[in-house]
Amino acid sequence: MIKVRICALFVGTLLSAWAPFAADAQPVSIKLGHVAPTDEPYHQAAEKFAQLVKQYTDGAVEVQIFPNSLLGGQRELLEGLQLNSVDATLTTAAVLANFLPRTQVIELPFMFRDRAHVYKVVDGPLAQEIYAGDEAKKMKVIDTWENGFRNITNDVRPIERPDDMKGIKIRVMENKMYIDMFKALGANPTPMARGEVFTALQTKTIDAQENPLGQIATSRFYEVQKYLTLSRHTYSPEALVFSLATWNRLSPQHREAIRRASAEAKAYNRELSAKMEDEYLAKLRANGMTVTTPSPEEIAAFQEKMTPVWDTYADKIGKDLIRKIKETR
């Protein structure tokens, strides 16, 4: 009886000692960095994601968002995931392709017919093929949010047909396929981090850049660029990617909560992105940009110029994967 009492007293003492620590347990903090300004749709969706994660984990997991390249450019953020100095990021497939080459299939020129085509691919089973090998690179791709279809701006002349690109020095993302894409048009592509682009345009280090309408408007490129061409030459996603080390530290319940929060934030992101396009275009026009919309025949001429790019990257990406995406309805 005495032994039982001593044992009970010992257990009670342990529980009493542990209780303050349990009550004061700090929430898991996740640092999420990206390169967009705070008025872009995917930053606003990131804020919604943070709110939902906190809600669905009862405050046990908190997401801290670092926009505007505060933690580095896209490549630096992905390297940070590998080093576990950054917990999560939103990044384009083009930059992610430096680590997972097959992801650049999403940004092959003129790959997708429209947004509905994109969503069927990246929200379906093909996503597993596209992001295969992520864990071997110490990353975990969680979801595919939206950045948008990319368009060309420049300060030299209106771009209506491929020959108009000849000799234009254009900033591209740090991705070999984008370099090859614009070389095929006769331009001089210059890879550059997004945070450096405005100054480079302002100082005439480069003549042009290409981005979705949201980034063109929120980055105020209309202050240093006169011409906008609605080329929609590639679709640029924003993949939500976690450090594998961070992901593995989370409980199964918290992982599920993060996936649930991402699905809702992604839907909000896509809805907002599509809704804002007309507003962004109106803003660019109001600030003096001359807008060119190529005809179907002119777009076909751009597509024809991209044939060597497709030929070069089909083997690297996988012809079967490309075929499956093209056949998706």
Image (tube, rainbow, N blue to C red):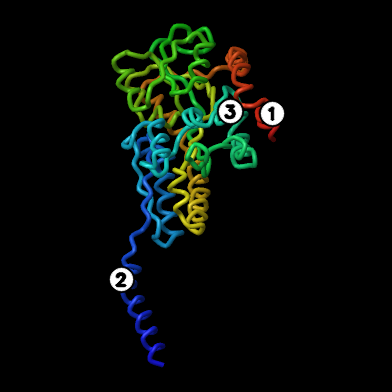
- Ranked by sequence position, the earlier of labels 2 and 3 is 2
Residue at x 32% of width, y 77% of height: 16
Q: Residue 281's quadrant in the figure?
A: top left
Residue 52 on image: x %, y %: 44, 54
Q: Which residue is mark 1?
A: 320
Q: Compared with residue 292, is residue 238 higher up or lower down, i.e. above or below? A: below
Q: Is residue 153 above or below residue 114?
A: above
| Residue 325 can be seen, yes or no | yes
What amino acid is found at the position of numbered circle 2 in the picture?
Answer: Pro
Distance between mark 2 and mark 3 Cα atoms = 52 Å
Which mark is on residue 105?
A: 3
Q: Say few, some or many: other residues with alpha carbon within 10 Å of mark 1 (under 14 / 14 to 19 / 20 or more).
A: few
Amino acid at dot 1? Asp
Q: Position of residue 181 (x, y in %)?
A: 52, 16
Of callouts 1 and 3, the N-terminal one:
3
Asked whether residue 41 is in view, the answer is no
Give the position of the N terminus as an image quadrant. bottom left
Mark 1, secondary structure of its residue: helix
State the residue position of label 2. Answer: 20
> Which of the labelled discs sits on residue 44, or is there none?
none
Amino acid type assigned to the residue bearing label 3 in the image: Val
Q: Residue furthest bottom?
A: 1
**Relative depth, front residue between 13 and 202:** 13
Foreground label between 2 and 3: 2
